[in-house]
Every structure is written in structure tokens, then in C-alpha cells.
Amino acid sequence: MAYTEEELKKELETKEYEYGFYTDIESDTFPIGLNEEIVIAISKKKEEPEWMTLWRLEAFRIWKSMEEPTWANVHYDKPDFQNISYYSAPKSADPNKTLDDVDPDLLEMYRKLGISVDEQKKLQNVAVDIVVDSVSVATTFKKTLAEKGIIFMPISEAIKEHPELVKKYMGTVVPQKDNFYAALNSAVFTDGSFCYIPKGVRCPMELSTYFRINQAGTGQFERTLLIADEDSYVSYLEGCTAPSRDENQLHAAVVELIALDGAEIKYSTVQNWFPGNKEGKGGVFNFVTKRAICEKNAKVSWTQVETGSAVTWKYPSCILKGDNSIGEFYSIAVTNNYQQADTGTKMVHLGKNTKSTIISKGISAGKSQNSYRGLVQVNSRADGARNFSQCDSLLMGNECGAHTFPYIEAKNKTAMIEHEATTSKIGEDQIFYCNQRGIPTEKAIALIVNGFSKEVLNKLPMEFAVEAQKLLEISLEGSVG
Amino acid sequence: MAFENNVDVEHPVHDVRMAAIKNFEEKGFPSKKEEAWKYTSLNNIQKIDFSIFPKQENALEYKDVKRYFIHEIDTYKIVFVDGIYSSYLSETTHDGVDICLMSAALTKPMYKQVIDVYFNKIASKDESLTSLNTAFSREGAYIYIPKNKMPKKPIEILHFSTGNEASLLLQPRNLIVVEENAEVQIIERHQSLTSNEVLTNAVTEIFAAKSAIVDLYKIQNDAATASLIDNTYVDQKDKSLVKIHTFSFGGKLTRNNLNFYQNGEYIDSTMKGVTILGEKQHVDHHTLVHHIQPNCESHQDYKGIYGDSSTGVFNGKIIVDKIAQKTNAFQKNNNILISDKASINSKPQLEIFADDVKCSHGCTIGQLDKDALFYLQSRGIPEKEARALLMYAFANNVLSSVRIPELKARINKLIAKKLGVNLGFDL
């Protein structure tokens, strides 16, 4: 029974966020610690071919020789890498656990997000059957997509089923030795998504992955590999949540995008990891390496809404290798309470007539620190390269900070580079105007923030934009007294 | 050792120097691994065996060096030849204001009060090159302008090196104190007269008291074998206005560290610069404005034109403290690359901890407008002159705020020379 695109769209509307991957339902968590045995054990568990095991081991050796970088404008207690379990498949949930056990704050948040109680159960992973359900949904889509020749599956399966593709592309954009966390990820990644769009195919729906950290004391290391073959198009969504815990959890993902000649990739992220509580306790450390390589006439567009995580440290980047390729980066980073974010992008212009656009909106409230760090590099052979960057920061309250660290390096005389940055606060007259018209202060702020971030929100796919707007409201709740 | 010709261990400056030596020994020369020196390498400089204290004195005739002075106007002059004060070429004064020598200020009891309050108070005790200067500096300018005073004429500080030594390290140390409601204009220039290697590691401390006005012009048009590391520290009090203009046309390697600390309210700090480079020249402008108190302003405007294989760096940092509300901080950096081998690295940086502020920075890298060039050419102006005219226009924003007309004319000539044209008029 073939799906029509119409049907698919309908299904998407209702089932968008059930599309998550859980690779193993049995309760299974490795002991804490990291050594070569653990790396081999993960590889075995995944029934990987030998080349993959060797690749992981090489990454592990590189990682051991590296030191954790400290240049970012964030402060945190370094994770103890020997105190983390590197493999954890979702446990069968305690059948007695009900929604009543769930943190009421979190429930309230879900209510505001408009997620029904059924969905809340799924998101909380309270009962195991829903996970099963979720997997089956994935399979349905897989079949429909397969008719178009699109491969979309967990990367662990892809390693077994499409080793030639994985082998050819994995590590070409983010090599094992790229950085400390990329090396760690390369050694111990447990799962993630793999996607291949064949030549000339326009993916009929938004592909989506929903990430969650469930277990306590585990780190999550997923790896996404997305290949858009010549003249293809795909829009990819990524969502993240995590339950609240007192401890800090580590999330170190790697995302590699390959846009071959004439391909276009739209990659949107709504990152809402647990940001820690109001006192700054707990929360996820989000140390992610995301990079795209653009061949001739290709286009990659990163859109991100960062509202969660205690510490965010990520720079989705574009290597504009082919002539006429285009890189875009649209970002909203919201920090509240004790959150810290050091995020931005790198645009490396190598090909001729390459273009890049950077729009970054930072909103800091509470006692948070929000940094934009970006690099625009024009190499000597990149004739006619063009860049426009805009970084705006909005400060709420006088205990937060907003920082910008743009690096601009030009080695070609035909380069045109523009960079602008501003910092401001929400005007009292703006709030007064809203109040006067019966809009309470909290709503007024949401309104103004939405307006401030509109340029980025507009770039998100419809469903995501709605969620992102609500997330902004929630993240800033209580930030104005 | 330096100021202390006869080492006097009782002298308070002795301790300052010892601490500085210790800091330099610990840190050494900065390397490219340090964020602040990411784009400027001192490796080549460190290979040269500099002599720190020249063995013989060398006299210069005024007619030989006249062209380096702003000789069209009368000025006070403090002139150093190979780091040693040249009384013959200088014109100092104690008439109401003190315009004299650092070595005198440090040793004579009548200046002790000022030295105790100001010497080495704002200069970094952490930065290794500043420490090197603190430890070994030998001479410099001492300028003290008392309350409500203004010197009758501008002050010129000139450093000549004659090439007596194969390679020379100069470490001038200046102290400029401008008291309440006083005003001063200073022109500073380093000039090498030969093709021997010279490295200047200068430190200047400027203290602007309430409502004081300080205008400092730095002319950097040195020989192709001369390198300069300039560290300027500025401490400003309420309602003071300090403007520093930097004109960088020459030298092999130039590094300007301008550090402004706004220790008061309603302060205005202005930094402007024009950089025109060719050959293998390298200029690194490193600015810091620390907004510590509310209601202050800072303005930065740097224009750069880079040709041949030259490299330019701009790193502007603005820090706004939590209590520094109502701060207005603006920063602008515009660059033109006119050669394929030239490169520019720009890093405007904002660190803001206060919410009620207006801060912005803008940075552009581009080329001359082709349409404008065509317009001029179509009216009979040759391409070379047309390009020069457009570059003049590009730099004019900075030039227009130079308050000494003769100096402005001089800089115009320097720009015309650097661009290799004669437009037959001054802008």
C-alpha cells in the first residue's frame, strides 16, 4: 500500500514527535568508565563490522592524547569521563511509576507546550510499550521513504545495511581528531540517525529525530550522518529533551552533513535539554560538533533554537568548498537562571562566489551568560565571496551577560564581508505600551522577544516554529520581576 | 640597571622593577598560542640579538631630522637619540607645567609625590612586555599639567635611532598626568634613521583627572626594519575626554595596545586610526575599553587599507561592568583589501554585563566602489588618482577630527606619499 504525499503530510502533522529512535528495549546499561574494552563492547553490542570497531579504537586513542579545551566562555565542573556509563539502552520502566511521580514543573511545561497526557507519558518514557509503538512508527515511514530511494534509519543499522555509504562519508566532515568531544563521540557513539537522499530526489516530508537522555549517570553520544546526493533536497528536524536531574549529564553529539553538487539541506534544531533548576543545579552539558560540507551550487541552512542545557557549546558550521555554494546560519539562543551558552558558527569560504549569512539572536536573562562566537574565513582562492553577519543581543535584568567574539579573516581582495552587532534591552516604553492595552508584562515580554527573534523563527518549519515560540515563553518565565 | 644608574635598593621603584623582572621571567615573550597574540607572531623579532644599552652616544644635527618634526608650528620637544635624551634637539619647560624627563622625575624629590601616586599604577603588572619595559626602561617623557592649566603649544615626543648598533632595543617609558580641567596635545613619533633593526617596546601611562582633555596623536611611519610594540594605558576620571589617533603607515611590525579604564562617570574615550600598508608590513591594533562606571561613552573608528603582502589585525574589546548602566559604546572597523596577497583579521569583541546599554560594533571588508571609480575616470581623472581619491575619502572621517591643522596637512602628505600620488590639494 503506497502512501501518497498527502497522506504522509497528514500523518506527519499528528505524529511528528513520535519519531524517535530507541535501539534496544531491554534494560541494559554498561558499567561506568571508559577503556578500550568498553569501546570494543559497544561495537560488539551493535554487531558492527570490524572496520567500524577499528575506527572507534583509533578515535579512542586520539581522544586519550587530547586535553579538554578551555577556551570557551563557559565555566563548569569538568565531567569525570570515568564516572559515566557509555552505553545505556532504555530500561523497562517501573510499571508502578505513573505521571504523579513526575516533576510537576515538567508536567506544567508539557501542558503549556500543548502536548497531551498520552504524549507526556511517551516523552517521560514512563511505560515501555510506547517506546515499542514509537519504533513501529519509524518503520512505517521508512518503507514509504524507501520507495523514493531515501534511506532513513538508525546509524547502527546503516553501518550493517549500507556500509559502503557509511564508510565513504563518516568522518569526512568531522574527523576523529577534530576536537576533544568529537573524538570521544567517534569512539563511543551508540546511535543516531543516518539519512541518504538519492540524486534528484526531493524528500517529500520533514525528517525528524527526537533525542532524549533517560538514564541517570549516562552520557549521550549520538552521531548523525546526512548525505544529500546531487540536486536533492531534504529538511531535517531535531528535537531534544531530558528529564530533570540533580546531576549534570553529558551530551556530546556529532552531526555531519554532506551536500553534494546542487543539493540543499535544511537542518533545524530545537534544543530543550534540561537546563538545570533555578539554583543552577543539574542540567545537561551540551557539547556538540555540527558541520556541513557544501559542494558546487549546494546550500546548507542551519536553524537552531537553543533554550535548554546548563552549558551549551556548539558551532554548527559550513565549509563552502564548491563554487557558488551557500551557507546559512539562523540562531536563537536563550539563557535564563544559571545557564551558559557559547554558540555561533563558522563559515569557511573556499570556493568562488560562495555566500554566507549569519543571523544570531541572543537573549539572556536571570544570571545567565550568553556568548556568540563565530568565524568568517575567506581563503585566497575564494573570489567573490560574500558574507553578511548580524548578531543581536537582548539583555533582561542586570545580572546576566552578553558577549560577542566574532573572528573575521579575509585573504582575498574581492571578498565582501559585513558584520554588525548590537546589544540592547527591552524598552520600558514598549512594555508600558503593551500594559496599557491590557497585555500583562509577562505576555508583553514574550511578544517583544518573539518580535526580536522573528527573523530566525520564520526560517523554522511551521510546526517547529510554533513549538519554538512557546519554548521561548517558557524559558523566559519569571525572568522579569 | 636602567633608571637606577647606581642601584639604590631603598628606592621604591627598585621593588617595582624587581617584581616586573620576575613576571617577565615567568611569562616570557607572548606566543601565538595566547589569544591576544593569535594573529601576531614575535618569533622573527626574538631571533634578533638586540643590544639593550647602546655603548656610545650619537649626536644629530637639527637640519638632518627637521622633516620629522611638525616644524611648521612651534612645539615643546622631547627628543631621544638611541634612547638617550638629546638636550640639544629638545625644548622642555617647567613654566607652570612640567614637560621633562622620566629619569629626572623618578630621582628628584620634588616629583616624588606625583611618582608615588601615578607611576606604574595603571600599567599592567601581568602583561609580560609591559613588565619588560617596567624592568629595563631607561628614559621617557614626563608630562605633568596642573589644575586648570594648558601648555602654550603642543608637545612632540620623538625617538630617533641612528643605527650605531646593529640592532637596538628601545624601551621608552612615558608618564602623562593631566590634572582637573587641564588640557594637553601630544604628538608622538618613532623614527629609525638607518636600515638597522630596531625594536621599540614603549609603555605610556596617561591619567586624565576630572574634566581633563588629552589629545594624543601617534604617527607610525618608520623604516621597514623598525618594529614597534606600543602599550598605552589610560585612566580616566569624571567628565574627562581622551582621544588617541593612530596613523600607521610604516614599520615592519607594529602592535598597538590601547587600554582605557573609565573610572568615573560621563567620560568620553575616543580611539581612531588610519592604517595604510604595503609590502610585508604588519599592523595589529588591539584596543580595550573597560566601562567601569555608569553614563560613559566610547567611540572607536579604525580604517585600514591593505596592499601587497601586508597583514592587518584589529581586535577591539569592550567590557561593560554590571554597574556601568547607560553606557554607549560604539566600535567601527572598515577595511579595504587592494591586493590578492594582503589579508585582514578582525575580531571585534563585546562583553556586556549591564542591561541598560547601547553597544554596537560593525566591521566590513570590501573593495573600492567600481561605480565611483568609473564615475571619476569618466571625468578624466586617471585610475591611480581616482583610487587614491576614494581612499582619501574612506580615511577622511578619522582625519577630520585631528585638531592641529599643520598635523593634519602633514598626515595628508604622508597618505599621498604612501598611495604614490600627488593630488595637488589637501583635504
Image (spheres, rainbow, N blue to C red):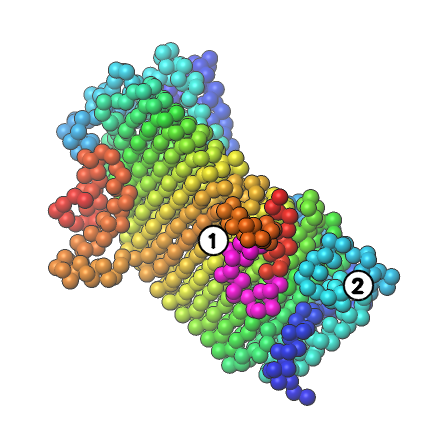
Left or right, A91 with respect to A414, comes to right
Is B279 contained in the magenta span?
no
Q: Earlier in the sequence, mark 2 or mark 1?
A: 2
Left or right, A101 with respect to A51, comes to right
Q: Is residue B133 above or below residue A474?
A: above
Task: Give me the residue at 65% from left, 87% from top.
Answer: A2
- Image position, residue B427 (x, y; %): 19, 44
Left or right, B350 with respect to A243, comes to left
Q: Is residue A118 above or below residue B52?
A: below
Magenta stretch?
A: A446-468
Q: Mark 2 = which residue?
A: A126
Which one is nearer the viewer's eye here, B397 or B199? B397
Count neighbours of disc 1 (C-alpha within 10 A) and say few if under 14, some if 14 to 19, many if 20 or more: many
Dominant SS of magenta comes to helix
Indicate which disc residue A434 carries. none
Indicate which disc residue A391 carries. 1
State the image quarter where residue B144 is shown. Answer: top left
Q: Report, in whole angstroms, how far the alpha carbon at label 2 lies from the one at label 1.
A: 41 Å
Task: Give me the residue at 18% from left, 42% from top.
Answer: B413
Task: Give me the residue at 52% from left, 75% from top.
Answer: A233
